[in-house]
């Protein structure tokens, strides 16, 4: 039984001492952030004015069609409610 205890004790990993690492300061973090920000902004692909116009028209048409559909459903339910009451 004492042998079992020894084998389990041997399997435990040794404690690793943590070294105090110097954390970067405020200005170092800000510099890193701005550098990464510049890198990400350079990856942006802006739509052309023609694409913006086309997308705007599509959105307006879909909103109008949705409004008409919801209005028709509302009128149908109002008509059916009038028949019941």
Image (spheres, rainbow, N blue to C red):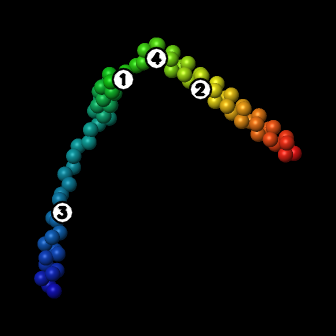
Task: Label 3: state its secondary structure.
Answer: loop
Do the numbered discs 1 and 2 sit on residues whose CB atoms are within 8 Å?
no
Query: Which residue reaches farthest top?
Result: 49
Q: Which residue is mark 4?
A: 51
In which image quadrant can residue 47 be found?
top left
Please tell me which of labels 4 and 3 falls first in the chain.
3
Do the numbered discs 4 and 3 sit on residues whose CB atoms are within 8 Å?
no
Please tell me which of labels 4 and 2 falls first in the chain.
4
State the CA–CA distance, disc 1 to disc 2.
Answer: 27 Å
Within 10 Å of the Cα at label 1, are there few (<14), some (14-19), or many (20+) other Cα atoms? few
Q: Which residue is mark 3?
A: 15
Checking the image for residue 44, the label placed there is: 1
Query: Which residue reaches farthest right?
Result: 85
Checking the image for residue 33, the label placed there is: none
Front tag of 4 and 2: 2
Please tell me which of labels 1 and 2 falls first in the chain.
1
């Amino acid at each position: 039984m004492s042998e079992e205890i020894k084998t389990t004790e041997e399997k435990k990993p040794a404690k690793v001492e943590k070294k105090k690492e110097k954390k970067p300061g405020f200005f170092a973090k800000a510099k890193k952030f701005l550098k990464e920000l510049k890198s990400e902004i350079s990856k942006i692909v802006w739509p052309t004015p023609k694409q913006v116009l086309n997308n705007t028209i599509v959105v307006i048409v879909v909103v109008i069609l949705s409004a008409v559909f919801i209005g028709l459903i509302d009128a149908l339910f109002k008509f059916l409610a009038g028949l019941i009451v």
